[in-house]
Image (cartoon, rainbow, N blue to C red):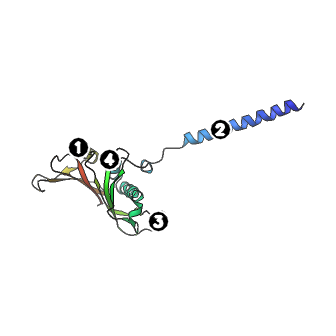
Amino acid sequence: MSSPLIFSCFRWVVRGCFALILCGCSEVTGKSKPPAMTEYPPELEQLLSLPVQQGRVGLDQVAVFLNRQYATHLRDGELSSPDTGGEAVLADGYILLNASTWISHRIPEESGLNTNVRKIYFTVSKTPCFPLERFIQISGAITKPPGTYPPNYRLYHYRGGEVNMSASVSYPDFECITDINMAVN
């Protein structure tokens, strides 16, 4: 008599475990993918396109990434031109050489990362080269007429509703972007 009872109990335990496994799997697969900027490190295109696509919100997301990346260089929630020594390699292989953020005013935040940024600056290594043409595609940037810059330097501007962005290219090829500036209008 005890054998059928044990088998019956075992069968219910197995069914219960199977149901828990199914519930657990459906919970994992049912979750949405986290926002792109929570994946570290992001790609350079992402850092450039977020302010263009999302304005102020995108600029804040770039600032949060830079502040997390360079947390040891934060002073009162503001980043001050750290030299990365080529160690800040993004997901697509591009390298940030340095970065700075300037904030409008202090907003206390538990994480210590102030997202009320006014300006962002960072330098991209020329190797690998991030093509100027790709920057123009992402931002729709234009350049000033020839003769307005020194012969070894050109600046391309994007002006959006909330954010301005510029990228510089330099001699001899004028093909690789180097310095990126982003600012709130």
Give me the disc on residue 109. Answer: 3
First along the sequence among labels 1 and 4? 4
Q: Secondary structure at mark 3?
A: loop
The residue beneath circle 2 is 21
The residue beneath circle 1 is 133
Q: The N terminus lies in which quarter of the figure?
A: top right
- What amino acid is found at the position of numbered circle 3 in the picture? Glu
For the residues marked 2 and 3, what is the alpha-carbon distance in whole angstroms? 39 Å
- What amino acid is found at the position of numbered circle 2 in the picture? Ile
x 73%, y 35%: residue: 14
First along the sequence among labels 2 and 3? 2
Res 184 quadrant in image: bottom left
Q: The C terminus lies in which quarter of the figure?
A: bottom left
Q: Secondary structure at mark 2?
A: helix
First along the sequence among labels 2 and 1? 2
- What amino acid is found at the position of numbered circle 4 in the picture? Tyr
For the residues marked 1 and 3, what is the alpha-carbon distance in whole angstroms? 38 Å
Task: Specify few, some or many for label 2: CA neighbours under 10 Å numbering under 14, 14-19, or 20 or more.
Answer: few
Q: Is residue 121 above or below residue 16?
A: below
x 13%, y 53%: residue: 152
The residue beneath circle 4 is 94
Return the x and y of residue 77 as percentages of the image width and height: 40, 66
x 12%, y 56%: residue: 150
